Image: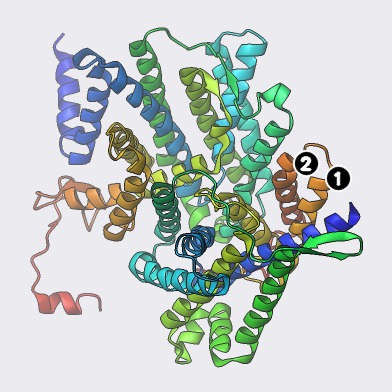
Amino acid sequence: MLQDILVTGLVNGGVYALLAIGFSLIFGVARIVNIAHTAFYMLAAYCFYTLLVKTGLGFFLSGVISVAAVTLFSVVCYRLVIEPVREHEAAVLIATIALALVFQELMLYTFGGHFLGIPSTLEGSMRFLGVSIPYQRLLILVVAGAMLVLVWFLLYRTRLGLAIRATANDLEVANLMGMNVHRVAMATVAISVSLAAVAGVVVAPVFVVDPFMWLAPLVTMLAIVVLGGLGSLKGSLIGALIIGYVEAITVFAVPAGAYLKGAVALLIMVIVLLARPEGLFGVAFEEER
Amino acid sequence: MMYWPRRAWAELRNEVFVLPSRTLVLLWVAALLALPFVYGDAYVLRILTMTCIFAIFAASWDLLAGYTGQVNFGHALFFGAGAYTSGLMSLKLGLSPWLTVWAGAAVAMLFGFLVGYLCLRLRGSYLSLATLAFPLIALGLLFAFPDFSGGELGISGLRRLMVTPTANYYVAAISMLAIIFALWLLADSKFGIVLHAIRDDEVAARASGINTLRYKMVVFAIAAAAAGFAGALFAHYLRVAGPSTLEVALSFQVVIWGIFGGLATVYGPVAAVFILYPLTEWLGSFAGIGELRLLIFAVIVLLVLLFMPRGLTPWVRDKIETQCPRCKQRNGSWKKICRLCGAALQAQVSRAQRLVGHQ
């Protein structure tokens, strides 16, 4: 059971980290609380399903096309829906909620409400420390790790990354230094949604695909981001691992744990917030006046 | 003998008919109360009863989020607390629903104190995202103890407050009018001004000697009590208190209503509920587009926001009324001079003057 907890926690933590880091990035740079973030994850899963099962493209090709298509689509959505109301924080908030609802209903209408299964990308499993780990879960872990390294490289070793970090740190000064903050915000949207889309593509064969699959990870992702500190990437990564393990422990070690896993994860978040209102790694924001 | 009618007519003419917004409110109240006599269709009454209940819920959210700036993403907790408390008490203890509705509001108020206390140190987005957690924790607990809570099915077989649809409608409509009016009075009083101050600058409010912590707790409790009352009415009207009263969807729904109608107005969310809820129900009654109703709902919200980012009612109000530049009183937009202080409302300035006007 201990090994089960270790492996499940790590795999789920990896997926949550992909989602939470994207969300955190976009909040840090553009101050957008993007409720539609996991809706893009759902869109990517549906796109993957269509390409793989309906048109019969290969696993790799359909995965890459889905991520690219969803990323492009997110930039279009940002330009059409979010950017015109950027100054009104409340309007941005419900614009993202409404977007998520639109995606959910569109998928419900096109594919129906039933669960869609996707055949495993990789068959077989390996034994490690006495637990059998399906290759599919291993793939999730590898992809999540690779994406995290890629994001780290992008943010800390490229000029675009420098611009993104500068904008997150202080939007006005970054603007004065000659950075095009609108374009930086758009690039951030693309990066963050592509992370969510990758997560959607790799988990689709493990979980089932249905139009409401965005709600549960949304709540967990928000808990992680708040736990780690809004806008902090390190916090999101560590928060994702914490919540991943807490959920795994609850499911495996507590009776009726499957119902309680969300509640326990959220309770941990509330407790951390009581002790440290800015999250584990958050910086207390100066009050903006 | 003729004094009181004449006095009432004078008040109406001088205070209500001078402003189109007040006239609209008066017409709306009259229409709401007269509807069952004119058009007593059971289906329409049912939709309007639900609309009234949700209007209480949306207005209570606005007091918290719009006035005080505590944008609560978990307002469904209070609605669900009211619904479940009232339902359980009337079913297990056999009490009359007329009593348990108040108990539901009281328990929701306790939850409001609790959430308010836990969230005292949080602000902005942290508060929104943390409050999202509370109804989900409650939902997890309900599912973990299905013997007590009925699990996924909820508690069914509750008694209604009244027997006939018309009587139920009046219960919902009159409690809605009373609560909305009370909330509006509260928001318009000195208490409401303090709430505005807390939203705009909490540090400055505290520096001015306002105990902001106590105010925030009290607002959480009041909003929660109103929402719990709505939840209890909802449970007894539908005769079931289920997990749908605690879902994320309901919390998001109230956020959409509140922002769509216009924040910090009380009447804005009410107007939004009265437009959006019957609209979605009406769309749902068509066979062809019934499945699309949530999609159409979301698209309408998006389009309206693109043109009126501050919400519906502030936009409409700016179209039909203008504010006097001198005494800040509102006037009908057809007026040339202010009805109270006589200042010119539409200053006839040339374009060149307007350009240098601010120096």
Q: Residue at x 64, y 35 (%)?
A: B111
The residue depicted at 68 percent of the width and 31 percent of the height is B142
Taking the image as shown, residue B227 lies to the left or right of residue B27, namely right
Closer-to-camera residue (A166/B318): A166
Residue under circle 1?
Answer: A253
Image position, residue A63 (x, y; %)? 54, 70
Q: Is residue A197 above or below residue B187?
A: below
In three-dimensional space, the C-alpha distance between marks 1 and 2, rounded to whole angstroms, equals 7 Å
- Measuring from the top left, give residue B90's x and y in whole percent: 60, 13
Instruction: Name the amino acid type tagged 2.
Output: Gly
Name the chain letter of the residue that bears numbered label 2.
Answer: A
Q: Kindly identify the amino acid type of the residue bearing the numbered disc 1.
A: Ala
Q: As rendered, which of A119 and B123 lies closer to the eye?
A: A119
Question: Residue A75: x percent and y percent?
Answer: 41, 72
- Place of residue A23 in the rendered image (x, y in percent of width and height, measured from the top left): 57, 66
- Image quadrant where residue B289 sits: top left
Q: Which mark is residue A257?
A: 2
Q: Residues within 10 Å of mark 2 (few under 14, many from 20)?
A: some
Q: Are marks 1 and 2 in contact (CB under 8 Å)?
A: yes
Q: Please indicate whether residue A42 sits to the left or right of residue A134 in the image.
A: left
Q: Report which quarter residue B95 is drawn in.
A: top right
> Observer-nearest residue: B142 or B345?
B142
Q: Is residue B288 shown left or right of residue B121?
A: left
Specify the subunit that label 1 lies on.
A
Q: Residue at x 26, y 59 (%)?
A: B307
Q: Secondary structure at mark 2?
A: helix
Give the residue at x 73% y 46%: A261
Q: Is residue B356 above or below residue B35?
A: below
For label 1, the SS is: helix
